[in-house]
Image (tube, rainbow, N blue to C red):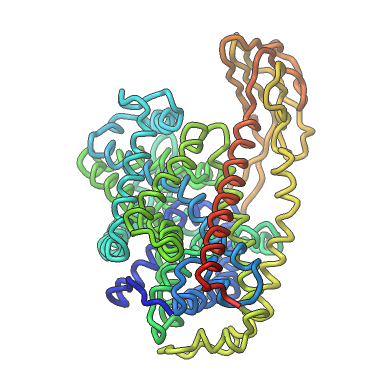
Amino acid sequence: MSVKAESWGSRVGLILAMAGNAVGLGNFLRFPVQAVQNGGGTFIIPYLVCFVVMGLPLLFIEWSTGRYGGRYGNHSTPYILDTMAKGRIWKYIGVFGIFTNIAVASYYCYIESWTMSYVYHSIMGTFSNMDQAGIADFFDKYTTIGKSTTGIPYEAVIFYVVCLLLNTYILSKGLKGIERVAKIGIPMLLLFGAILAIKGLTLGTDGASEMFPDANAWDGLNFLWTPQFDSLTNPKVWLAAAGQIFFTLSVGMGTIHCYAAYLKTKDDVALNAVSAGFMNEFVEVVLGSLIVIPIAAGYLGLDWVLQNAGFGMAFQTMPYLFQQWGETLSVFAGVFWFGLLFFAGITSSLAMGTPWMGFMRDEFKWSGKKGAWSFGLIILLMGLPTVFFYKQGVFDEYDYWAGTVSLVVFAFLETILFAWIFGIKKGWAEINMGADIKVPIVFKYMILVVTPLLLAWVLFSSLPDMADKITNQDTNNKEWFTDTFYAENLDADGVKTGVVDSVATNFIKLSYQNEKQVYNKDLDKLETEVFTDYKTYSFKDGQTVTVSKGDIIKPKDTIATGSFTNNVFYKTLGRLFLVGLFLFISLVVYRAYVKRRKEGRVHS
């Protein structure tokens, strides 16, 4: 066995670092939106069930697997898995544990850079006197490369590069750098979160206005915590809950394995797993539910929240809401909120660098600095397409394939390895080795039967969605380059028609009948309301609109001609980048295998 060059300085530092790995942007941005979109309080039920039957078992598996591999001098998933079973295939299954981190970090650091930018703009007073539409437009311009919100050319790119440099510098300091950031970042995150959560709890109807006279923060809280039981039988709600558990706990990624690989043989993995898991759940369920939704409902009303809930909502609305607190308090609130998001983001993105660094140090004797800066360079090359082509869908492709599908695939395979190939008897002994707490025996059978079956169900249920993604079923403009642009679907079935409401040289506005959900406070339930909605298309010079006002437009009707580069081109480019990254890491793992074979270190 090789001697580990690094180890954690303290259990507190390790738990805070692991909590930082799990506590991320998803706790404050993704969780409340997922809850709103999936039945409010109903979502909490499958969410907590998934935490118990999938989240905790996977935490036990990944902590104990990482510590086991670390005893053999392995600090990333390719050779951690290789130590657990015979056969060459497992080291390549372990590629997911490096691939996912690099791919997710590529776009995750972009969101992280938004938080840096918004802290800067909060301090500089950029949002002063902006109405809500102006702040939403600010976000739109910020993510449109070529436009500038402040006169700084390529502002989004600059903040992205600065964010990467900061991450890379901290990573180059090794575990001590990560532990130091976690010890500062997590307490600051909790402090900022508590301040904003108190505001969310005490706002009440104080934010109501002439435009939103029924605005009430308590409506947001009531909706989040009052189950709409008719949603409980919807499989999509359960899939969303399972996906959020993966996202929030950072399981199925390989970062937990890597952190746990630096534990000592008798260090307790059971208590560490439970501590980090429940700290994450506290931040997500308690703090995460008390900030964005209540404050937004307190100023804009619950119905507005129901119709506009999305990942970017906090960036498009919170600066405006903070302006209602006065000039001075709005600055502090902006720094608290976006500073909270930054600390949540950076403690997670730092964890994503450790599997690559651990692998290159183990196999090729790279120094921590060389591993960190090479990681930063790969992230830059992989991430720039998500920055430049954010509006074209590259960001979403990365998030779907690397941030969702890859997690489920890897989690399923590692659970099969742990429970059925390594063996549940050895696995259970590994979980309980040195444990200060006694893990309930029921988790042994969950890991053996329930967890793999649920993971298989989630994976199988996602296959139709994956097929739709690959075949670009979300658009009628499927050609990369074309001289014709078609109308997109106005509903999921692609049967609804629209009417040209207004038209200009490079612009079309369609009106159509749509449905939205509104909350009936008297009946304490969601209701569907029909309203007139609009869809707009903007075209460039050289692209000619071919419809007139009053025309009835069906999906796939030609609405413009000219020279078009459709979004499917950029999405395909993003998928090719991801495939190329996976093949590149597989090649690096193969080179490591050849090197090990020459040195007589091949596991048998």
Left/right of residue 147 with respect to residue 162 in the rendered view: right
* The quadrant where residue 317 appears: top left
Asked if residue 172 is positioned above or below residue 162 in the image, the reply reads below
Between 25 and 509, the one nearer to me in the picture: 25
Left/right of residue 7 with respect to residue 310 in the rendered view: left
The percent position of residue 349, horizontal first and vertical second, equals: 40, 54
Residue 202 visible at all: no
Query: In this view, which residue lies farthest toward the front?
Result: 598
The percent position of residue 532, horizontal first and vertical second, equals: 65, 30
Between 152 and 43, the one nearer to me in the picture: 152
Left/right of residue 58 with respect to residue 359 in the rendered view: right
Quadrant, the N terminus? bottom left
Q: How many marks?
A: 0
* The quadrant where residue 419 appears: bottom right
Query: In this view, which residue lies farthest toward the right?
Result: 495
The percent position of residue 30, horizontal first and vertical second, equals: 49, 53
Left/right of residue 47 with respect to residue 235 in the rendered view: left
Between 251 and 575, the one nearer to me in the picture: 575
Q: Residue at x 27, y 74 (%)?
A: 9
Residue 120 visible at all: yes
Q: Residue at x 32, y 55 (%)?
A: 369
Quadrant, the C terminus? bottom right
Asked if residue 92 is positioned above or below residue 420 in the image, the reply reads above
Q: Residue at x 77, y 21 (%)?
A: 557
Q: Residue at x 59, y 12 (%)?
A: 506
Between 79 and 45, the one nearer to me in the picture: 79
Asked if residue 519 is positioned above or below residue 254 in the image, the reply reads above
